[in-house]
Image (tube, rainbow, N blue to C red):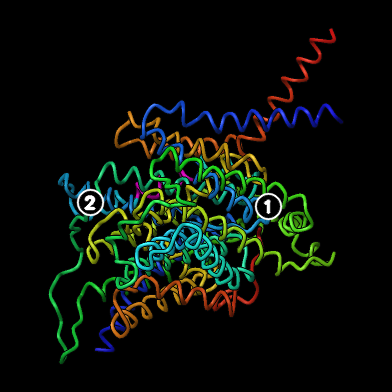
Amino acid sequence: MKKTKNSNFLKILIAAALIMIIPVLTPNMYIMQIVNMICIYIILGTSINVLTGFTGQLSLGQAAFFGVGAYTTALLNTRAGMQFFTCMVISVLITALFGVVLAVPALKVKGSYLALLTMGFGEVVRIVMINWTPVTNGTAGILGIESPVIFGFTFDTLKKYYFLIMVFVVLGLLYQNIIIHTRTGRAFVAVREDNEAAELTGINVTGYKIRAFVLSAIYCGIAGCLYAMMIKYVSPDTFTNNVSSVILWTAIVGGFGTVAGPVLGGIIMQVLPEALRFLGDWRLVIYGVVLLIVILRFPGGLYPYIQKLLQSFHKKQAAAEKG
Amino acid sequence: MFFQQILNGLTNGSLYALMAVGVTMVYKSLGMLNFAHGDTMMIGTFITLTFIKMGVPFYIAILLGIACASVLGFLLERIILRKVKFSSFVNLLIATVGVSYVLRNTGMVIWGTSPQLFPSMFPQTLIRIGNFTITPQSIGIILISLAIITGLHLFFTRVKVGKCMQLASSDPEGAAMMGINVTYMRFLTFGISAALAAVAGIMIAPLTYARIDMSATIGMKAFAAAILGGIGNLWGALLGGVILGVVEAVGAAYISTAYRDAYSFLILFVVLFLKPTGLLNKKIENKL
């Protein structure tokens, strides 16, 4: 017992050391930007992991929540001059509200219908972003968002900002890890596995579905707020259906229903297009093909597969030590 | 003015219906929406345009374009969807989303993002009755779409292959026991669905220009139309398409053109909330 505790402690220590050392190792701002985007996509991947991976509610409209969070922050910061924490709290509240709005029609449908419903929701939100010019400034987007200042400390460079994002990534992952081991998490999985059976055992399916939508929206709201404050510019082009697909892939490629899945997915999904830059125009095509192959070849995602590989490796090692 | 908008709505609506029929056919055999349907349409349209630009006679180019689209449909079924058949529903759906992503980006690389003129197969003269204008184009589009959907209905109810396809998609085990080659039938379903998409694309392109992003907007309206009318139902697809087209045209004329693309989804939300099975279906087909 003590040994596992020690090894867990060691793992956390290694993870913390890695987190601290990344900004020191990155040679330039370009790579730092990618690292920060990976972190934001880890939060987004976690959001869909809660909704689709654990609760089984497919969503192709996550970009809408992401966008609502980003726009709320952008507007509050540029028009009302609000600071980071106020922006984040209000963003989270508003995206949570949107989560409820989407959850109500989504309760009645599932499968393809739900996928289309969420996709349509994303599209409607984007159309509103483009056309509600007095508020959202149309296709031009909103410029001039300020860097967050917390207790007099300004997060003005990407490296400083990295630590701010990392706080939310770690908190988000921890919260996800905690919630799946609680009553709520077990209820989510029960709803995913069998709606009727869950209902029969006394689980309030409607309530838990709404909770999953809201929780997912909140994660997206946080990611949106962080994104807006990092890039300092929001426009409707950033929150298209393609982004929703990428968010879904982030969780799928890593492994749905696993805590570490979105982390792995976030890294792969952000690094791959940059690594494929040498292909020029064709890089997004190849990116799509690679993802398709991953989905076809590893239906459960890469993380469970890697875990299995590691396990068999450990077994072999143990056997070798014995023999 | 009002009737003018209704006519415009019917024109667009019959095109959405044509797309929705393809969506519905695939839904019946696979149990899910094919999110690459709109992209099949876009690719078919652009291949036709390429043939026209190469100097191939107009109607032969159209036939070649439709043939290429159905080959694409066959490939989609054979290479991708058959592989994920036995894994989870989510993966199947994501696979079609992935195919859509690949096709759209391929289109962008090959044909660029700027809209391109597409020649119409109908004469451009206007017929005026009072202050009411009819274009031969809209009449032609409505008639062709109606003819194709009626033809498909006859094909599915009268012709042996069509009946086999119906049975193979509604009851695969039963069909297999009757000696029907279910795999082949599904293959055929995908081919016909893709060909319909290409026909719709070739008729839409003269109205809106041939553009890469038409796959997203029109594809999503096709799904909305199919679900609105009641999925798996040919006449439902027609009804759904027409309703969407008319609502869009009237909404654009009397409320605001900017939100044109949003009306169809708002209607879809309302219908899914009030009657999730769609307008013409009695009970939801649960194939999940």
The residue carrying pointer 2 sits among few (fewer than 14), some (14 to 19) or many (20 or more) residues within 10 Å by Cα, namely many
Q: Of the residues tagged 1 and 2, which is closer to the observer?
A: 1
The x and y percentages for residue B33 are: 52, 58
Quadrant of the frame with the C terminus of chain A = top right
Secondary structure found at label 1? helix
The residue carrying pointer 1 sits among few (fewer than 14), some (14 to 19) or many (20 or more) residues within 10 Å by Cα, namely many
- Residue toward you, A302 or B164: A302
Quadrant of the frame with the N terminus of chain A = top right
Please state which amino acid type lies under the numbered disc 1.
Phe
Please state which amino acid type lies under the numbered disc 2.
Leu
- For residue B230, above or below residue B71: below
Residue B207 in the figure: left or right of residue A245? left
Residue occupied by mark 1: A54
The x and y percentages for residue B55 are: 15, 46
Res. A57 image quadrant: bottom right
- For residue B39, above or below residue A323: below
Residue at 38 percent across and 64 percent down: it is A81
Residue B69 in the figure: left or right of residue A201? left
The chain holding disc 1 is A
- Residue toward you, A126 or A232: A232
Res. B285 image quadrant: bottom right
Secondary structure found at label 2? helix
Check contact, mark 1 vs mark 2: CB within 8 A. Answer: no
The answer for how far apart the CA atoms under marks 1 and 2 are is 46 Å
What range is drawn magenta here?
Answer: B67-76
Residue A126 visible:
yes
Q: Is B69 in the magenta? A: yes
The x and y percentages for residue A93 are: 55, 67
Residue at 28 percent across and 88 percent down: it is B3
Residue occupied by mark 2: B49
Q: Is A171 in the magenta? A: no
